[in-house]
Image (tube, rainbow, N blue to C red):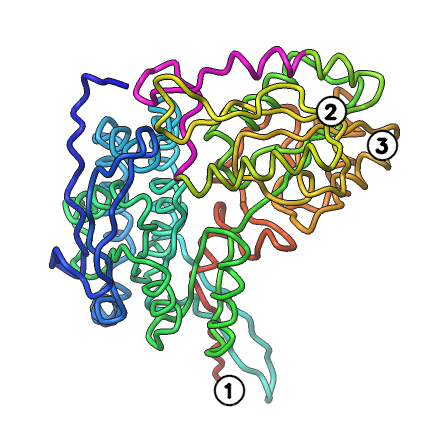
Amino acid sequence: MTSTLDTTRPEVTLRIGAEKRRAGSGGTFQHIDPCTGAPDAELPLAGPAEVDDAVKTAHDAFKSWRRTNPTERRRVLMRLADLIEQHTDEFIRYGTFDNGTPVGLVGGLVAMSVEWTRYYAGWADKITSEVSGTFGTTGEFSYTLSQPYGVIGVIITWNGPLISLAMKVPAALAAGNTVVVKPSELTPFSAMLFADLAAEAGIPDGVINIVPGSGEAGAALVAHPLVKKVTFTGGPDTARKILAACAEHIKPSVMELGGKSGNIIFADADLDLACSVGTLMSVGMMSGQGCALPTRMIVARPIYDEVLSRVSAIAPVIKVGDPFEPDTIGGPLVNEAALARVLGMIQRAHTDGARLVTGGQRLGGDLANGYFLQPTVFADVDPYCELAQKEVFGPVLAITPFDTEEQAIEIANCTPYGLSGYVFTNDLKRAHRVAEQMETGEVLINGAAPLTVHRPFGGFGISGMGKEGGREGLTEFLRTKSVSIG
């Protein structure tokens, strides 16, 4: 694989206040390029000592940031959004260095990150309170204060490092909080540019602190007594550990976790739209490494064979390869362990009786050293087998038929996840009826776009709790105090 682009990786440091530390007590981590399987950078890792320094720095910065005029918070966040937009090309390059996501998709995520930042910048000076009162000899005058928590512990995922920052940090800052961010050691590069631009935008030192680290650093961040709330994006297994630590301190949290989203295609659906969106979003986009992707296709039996034929024609022509080529849709899986795990699930799907329609193999040739996998589609999948119940986080689609609307809803709701749901139908009444019954945090009908900032995003069940996006995403970072005068 060759590219004429600048392949220089940015230096990764710990960002604590105005300091850029080139070493941490957590040791070092060798970053592997998932496209080649070769090391491409060594980065320092924060340990508990650096996390403590970062939290104390954020706590000191909070004392002045919370009192910063809201219009000034809005101004610097708007400036940050402008700078992210101006540095789109760098973010695309760094995002692809992070985890091999193709440049076309990273560009879209950068644009989305700009909009998330602008949206919450606009909320900074619109935080209001309520007033109530009674009259007479026992009357009182009461009002509420919407106040920031203080230091927010932010733990972001590896599959979308910039958008994960944009979904959390601007809202927390707009509300008046400061943050300590722990990016994944698998994807450290985008966070470095984000920190540089935040300083250039005029966000004061200490308001944003970034400490790449392992699970040890994350545990120290969650347990720190000066961290007043935690927001986490990742998997349920890690979330359980975080929640147990939060419970010890009675500490609130936002958990944006995994998904096993059902995509119901009814017989009256526009099949051109349903099959193209359903296939590209499950086995093409992010190579299936997204929590809200429609990885279970639940298809009305009268159109089942037609849908299988269409999907089996689309999936093999999805271009998987060099992420720096503009027409590449699928990149590699994030690391060798992820590839081995997904291949294991594919093998067990055969054992469970699913029928392989296309794919299922690691790619060879020029891609043999990277962690590339063919877009893979299984048909006749038992809705209660592992493939239909467990998040794959790879380019694998499970297709299951249904006979009635009630059965389709039952299949869609039969997993412990509840993040996103998808529906394709030209019957508007049915669309609303099914959306109401799907046990998910969002329902996307006929190709509606995911992750638009004005809509609350967040799941039910083991998909988590709390919201990002919309006004609810702001109020996650505010707590209400009542004041009453007798």
Q: Amino acid at mark 1?
A: Gly
> For this view, does 388 lie left or right of residue 23?
right
Q: Which residues are magenta?
A: 310-335
Q: Which quadrant, please, contains the N terminus? A: top left
Label at residue 405: 3
Q: Amino acid at mark 2?
A: Ile
Q: Nearer the viewer, residue 206 or 213?
A: 213
Vertical order, 373 against 27 (above or below): above
Q: Nearer the viewer, residue 326 or 199?
A: 326
The answer to whether marks 2 and 3 mark residues whose Cβ atoms lie closer than 8 Å is no
Question: Residue 111 at what x, y percent from top left?
Answer: 35, 30
**Residue under circle 2?**
265
Label at residue 486: 1
Q: Amino acid at mark 3?
A: Glu
Residue found at the far bottom of this picture: 137
Say whether disc 2 or disc 3 marks the residue closer to the N-terminus: 2
Which residue is at 47% across, 65% downward? 242
Which residue is at 33% across, 75% downward? 226
**Marks 1, 2: nearer the viewer:** 2
Our reading of the magenta stretch's main secondary structure is loop
Secondary structure type for disc 2: strand
Q: Quadrant of residue 105?
A: top left
